[in-house]
Amino acid sequence: YIPSVSNYIMRKSPPSNINLSGFGIGDGYTDPYHQISAHADMAFNAGLVDEAQADEIRVYQDIARANILEENWITAYEARLSMFDYIEEASGNVNIYDYRTYTPYNY
């Protein structure tokens, strides 16, 4: 976890030789239970889906969140991927990482 490592480097005694002036987190997923809860509202408010489609996204969110609570990580992950697939399909194949575009995201 990047913030923890950065904090350790900054507070290490004796001081580290690493010249740390900042850190970055790419595609950070630090609180999956709460982060996954935002996708339906985000897609609806951005005009990517209608209310019925947002409700369908909420079903995926609920499945993923329930599995997170039960620590069924693979099932939660699969529900999240299915949710993203649904958002892409319902929105006309929007790029879920940059919803201003319809360019496929290359994993």
Image (tube, rainbow, N blue to C red):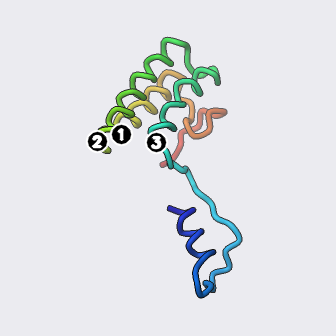
Q: In terms of secondary structure, where does tag 1 sit? A: helix
Q: Say which amino acid is labelled 1.
A: Ile
Disc 2 to disc 1, how far (Cα)?
6 Å
Q: What residue is rendered at 40% in x and 37% in y?
A: 81
Q: Position of residue 95 (x, y in %)?
A: 56, 35
Q: Nearer the viewer, residue 64 or 81?
A: 64
The answer to whether the residue labelled 1 contacts the one labelled 3, judged by CB atoms less than 8 Å apart, is yes
Q: Nearer the viewer, residue 64 or 100?
A: 64
Q: What residue is rendered at 62% in x and 33% in y?
A: 99
Q: In terms of secondary structure, where does tag 3 sit? A: helix
Residue under label 2: 72
The mark found on residue 68 in the picture is 1
- Determine whether 70 is above or below 51 in the image: below
Disc 1 to disc 3, how far (Cα)?
8 Å
The answer to whether the residue labelled 2 contacts the one labelled 1, judged by CB atoms less than 8 Å apart, is yes
**3 or 2: tag closer to the N-terminus:** 3
Q: Position of residue 47 (x, y in %)?
A: 63, 20
- Determine whether 79 is above or below 26 in the image: above
Q: In terms of secondary structure, where does tag 2 sit? A: loop
Q: Say which amino acid is labelled 2.
A: Asn
**1 or 3: tag closer to the N-terminus:** 3
Q: Say which amino acid is labelled 3.
A: Pro
Q: Pointer 1: residues within 10 angstroms few (<14), some, or many (20+)?
A: some
Residue under label 3: 32
Q: Classify residue 73 by image quadrant.
A: top left
The mark found on residue 105 in the picture is none
- Determine whether 104 is above or below 20 in the image: above
Q: Pointer 2: residues within 10 angstroms few (<14), some, or many (20+)?
A: few
Q: What residue is rendered at 63% in x and 22% in y?
A: 45
